[in-house]
Image (cartoon, rainbow, N blue to C red):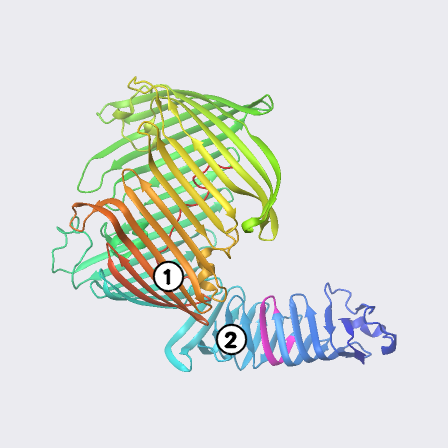
């Protein structure tokens, strides 16, 4: 018998040929490697307070603090026996069987390391990422396949969970899904509902069932429900059944699908059976088609598909069909606020090392949309093809398209043409004096139109262009280390990058006013412009996550242009100044400001300022909202805000604040104030809003251990008062109903050129 000894056992038929020294001869730090299986690539390692084996090498037994490891499997217990001939481990007493981050706890485990199958009696289970379970018996049927008899699964880690899904038969497939038949859903010890079949993907972070009750002025009292279904990983989605007091029932289905060879996509269909009040948000379009008192049937259908045909070829298609233009505004307020575009197209794009080819078909499906139709368009683009070992580069583009520009009903005007376009450019890359980059270029564009706006046929428009780009870069490094105000400054580098671009475009042979304006190709006109810009950048090194990285703590870019002449022979004109500043004084804080200054009126035409931050959050590694609302144990607080002003449209002030009042309670406040806005009143007449509160929202969240309870109260100038009550599992925070209003700043870095 060995005290706190380690036995490394590798069993084969040749085991009997080896002998073992006495216990006194053993040093636990100098144990011999007993290789009983010459064909085994990994040993079975047995560690315990005492370890014994028989002379024949067929069995090893261990007692006290036993640990058995093999590949990614680990077994801990108080007593274990390993049989070399059957490759079977029998473990007893506080047994924990761990595979990766998944584990089973039980009183007795029988496990075969060769077939990777076994049985756990009276098991407690944890399955990554969030499932806990318990049962009468658990069987491991394969590498990643488990079966629990007369048990339950839940995301609550309490001994007596707040809720559970209970069944006589539970199947768990690691990294794939959990399935059950004839299940009961319990809240506490009370059965709430019955399901004949349940399946949940371990890759899906949406809850199985969502019920959101509430009330607002547009819908009255409402209940929004979502029921998840899962057939397999290639066919899953949600079924929606909603009731709105003022609009009656609506039904919908959202399906995520996939194929092995032809890509994957999403299909969504929603049907709204408005039978009660026929209250629509704006009536000009539908009033003549939907007389008051009759049933109104409204719908929205959407299909998106993506297919990676090969490593360099991708096909994308989208289909959108709606009953009327206001269905988005009435039922999908977040999509409406984002100004979602409902295009209908199919596109194939192939990108190789030197060229990109694409094929596009775009067709109008809703007569209330204004659309440019491509029926179809084929395009070939080359990117900077170098001539041998010289510094000359060629860029080219050729496209052919059948075009229709269709105005929204009831306007019936249609511009149509067949167009063939080629653009060819030659450039030269050089470096003067070792510090000045110079790129002169010249090119020509030729475009054929089958007809123009005046009915003339077979036109060819020619255009010549040339120009030069100049750029350089200067920098100086300062040995500055500053830790004050919690700023992590480890050296400072100041980088100055001036650029000048000159572009000349000769008058095209056909004026753009005579052509249908389908896209940017048709906008070619005379230009004689110089565009200087200057970038200043401050950089330092600091810890980002667990690595020291170079960080831009501030970037400021100012630019303008000067047009030497116009097509109507007017004199030169200085353009507006654009100024952009982005700052990152801390890893958890972003500041972004953009403005446009008009030198002719000596005033700013637009200005915006945005900031987003959280003192306990590293923006490079985490998401603010996800962190705040899925981890109540941290006393996290975050903030975001912005001011946006436009000389023609008005100005607004927007902000959001999130705070953990206690480890169990969180509050969020969101405000949007129109300081000045030119809009439209509900009756359609123009209206000016001054210091008008456009929207405010307050959200109170409570940690209910495995649940999060949200009470949301929203006051909107356009939609009145709304309240909602939402319960969501911590494990599945992605509720399929967008119930909250959030501050959405512009994407940081998108308004500045690459550094």
The residue where tag 2 is placed is 133
Quarter location, residue 460: top left
Note whether 747 is above or below 514 in the view shown: below
Badge 1: residue crowd in 10 Å (few <14, some 14–19, many ≥20): some
Badge 2: residue crowd in 10 Å (few <14, some 14–19, many ≥20): many
Q: Is residue 309 left or right of residue 493?
A: left
Q: Position of residue 39 (x, y in %)?
A: 75, 64
Q: CA distance from mark 2 to mark 1?
A: 25 Å
Kindly identify the residue that appears in the image at 61 percent across and 50 percent down: 547
The residue where tag 1 is placed is 736
Q: Position of residue 606 (x, y in %)?
A: 34, 38
Count of labels in the image:
2
Q: Position of residue 43 (x, y in %)?
A: 73, 67
Kindly identify the residue that appears in the image at 69 percent across and 74 percent down: 67
- Please state the extent of the stretch shown in magenta in the rendering: 99-111
Which quarter of the rendered picture does the N terminus lie within?
A: bottom right
Q: Is residue 31 magenta?
A: no
Q: Main secondary structure of the magenta part?
A: strand
Note whether 218 is above or below 37 in the view shown: above
Callout 2 secondary element: strand
For the residue pair 473 and 250, the one nearer the viewer reads as 473
């Amino acid at each position: 018998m060995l005290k706190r000894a380690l036995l490394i056992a590798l069993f084969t038929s040749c085991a009997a040929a080896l002998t073992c020294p006495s216990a006194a001869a053993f040093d636990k730090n100098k144990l011999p490697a007993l290789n009983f299986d010459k064909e085994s690539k990994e040993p079975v390692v047995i560690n315990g307070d005492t370890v014994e084996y028989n002379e024949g090498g067929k069995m090893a037994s261990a007692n006290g603090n036993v640990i058995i490891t093999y590949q990614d499997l680990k077994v801990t217990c108080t007593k274990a026996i390993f049989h070399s001939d059957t490759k079977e481990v029998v473990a007893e007493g506080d047994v924990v069987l761990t595979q990766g981050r998944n584990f089973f706890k039980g009183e007795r485990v029988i496990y075969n390391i060769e077939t990777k199958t076994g049985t756990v009696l009276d098991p407690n289970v944890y399955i990554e990422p969030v499932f806990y379970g318990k049962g009468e018996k658990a069987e491991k049927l394969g590498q990643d396949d488990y079966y629990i008899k007369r048990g339950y699964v839940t995301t609550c880690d309490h001994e007596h969970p707040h809720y559970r899904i209970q069944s006589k038969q539970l199947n768990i497939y690691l990294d794939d899904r959990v399935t059950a038949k004839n299940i009961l859903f319990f809240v506490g010890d009370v059965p709430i509902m019955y399901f004949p079949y349940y399946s949940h993907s371990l890759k899906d972070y949406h809850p199985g069932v969502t019920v959101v009750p509430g009330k607002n002025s547009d819908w009255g009292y409402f209940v929004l429900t979502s029921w998840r279904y899962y057939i397999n990983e290639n066919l899953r989605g949600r079924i929606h059944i909603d009731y709105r007091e003022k609009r009656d029932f609506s039904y919908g289905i959202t399906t995520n699908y996939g194929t092995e060879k032809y890509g994957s996509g999403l299909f969504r269909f929603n049907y709204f059976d408005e039978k009660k009040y026929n209250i629509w948000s704006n009536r000009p379009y539908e009033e003549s088609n939907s007389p008051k008192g009759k049933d109104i049937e409204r719908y929205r259908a959407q299909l998106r598909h993506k297919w990676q045909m090969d490593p360099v070829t991708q096909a994308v298609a989208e289909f959108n069909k709606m009953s009327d233009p206001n269905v988005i505004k009435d039922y999908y307020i977040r999509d409406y606020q984002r100004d979602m575009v409902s295009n209908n197209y199919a596109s194939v794009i192939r990108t190789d090392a030197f060229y990109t080819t694409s094929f596009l078909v775009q067709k109008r499906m809703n007569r209330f949309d204004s659309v440019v139709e491509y029926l179809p368009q084929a395009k070939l683009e080359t990117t900077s093809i170098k001539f041998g070992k010289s510094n000359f580069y060629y860029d080219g583009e050729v496209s052919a398209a059948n075009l229709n520009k269709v105005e929204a009903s009831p306007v019936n005007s249609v511009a149509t043409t067949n167009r063939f376009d080629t653009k060819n450019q030659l450039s030269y890359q050089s470096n003067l004096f070792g510090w000045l980059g110079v790129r002169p270029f010249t090119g020509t564009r030729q475009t054929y139109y089958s007809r123009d706006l005046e009915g003339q046929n077979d036109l060819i428009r020619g255009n010549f262009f040339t120009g030069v780009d100049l750029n350089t870069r200067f920098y100086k490094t300062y040995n500055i280390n500053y830790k004050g105000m919690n700023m992590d400054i480890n050296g400072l580098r100041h980088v100055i990058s001036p650029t000048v671009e000159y572009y000349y475009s000769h008058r095209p042979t056909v004026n753009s006013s005579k052509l249908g304006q389908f896209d940017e190709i048709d906008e070619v006109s005379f230009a004689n412009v110089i565009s200087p810009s200057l970038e200043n950048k401050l950089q330092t090194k600091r810890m980002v996550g667990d690595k020291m990285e170079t960080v831009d703590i501030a970037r400021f870019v100012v630019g303008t242009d000067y047009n030497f002449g116009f097509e109507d022979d007017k004199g030169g004109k200085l353009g507006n100044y654009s100024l952009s500043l982005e700052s990152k004084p801390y890893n958890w804080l972003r500041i972004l400001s953009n403005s446009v200054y008009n030198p002719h009126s000596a005033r700013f035409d637009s200005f915006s300022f945005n900031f987003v931050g959280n003192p306990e959050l590293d923006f490079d590694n985490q998401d603010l909202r996800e962190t705040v609302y899925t981890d109540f144990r941290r006393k996290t607080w975050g903030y975001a805000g912005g001011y946006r002003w436009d000389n023609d449209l008005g100005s607004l002030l927007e902000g959001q604040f999130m705070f953990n009042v206690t480890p169990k309670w969180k509050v969020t406040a969101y405000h949007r104030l129109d300081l000045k806005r030119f809009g439209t009143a509900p009756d359609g007449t123009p209206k000016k809003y001054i210091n008008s509160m456009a929207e405010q929202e307050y959200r109170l969240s409570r940690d209910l251990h495995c649940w999060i309870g949200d009470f949301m109260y929203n006051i909107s100038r356009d939609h009145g008062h709304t309240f909602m009550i939402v319960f969501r599992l911590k494990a599945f925070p992605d509720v399929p109903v967008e119930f909250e209003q959030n501050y959405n700043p512009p994407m940081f870095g998108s308004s500045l050129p690459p550094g």
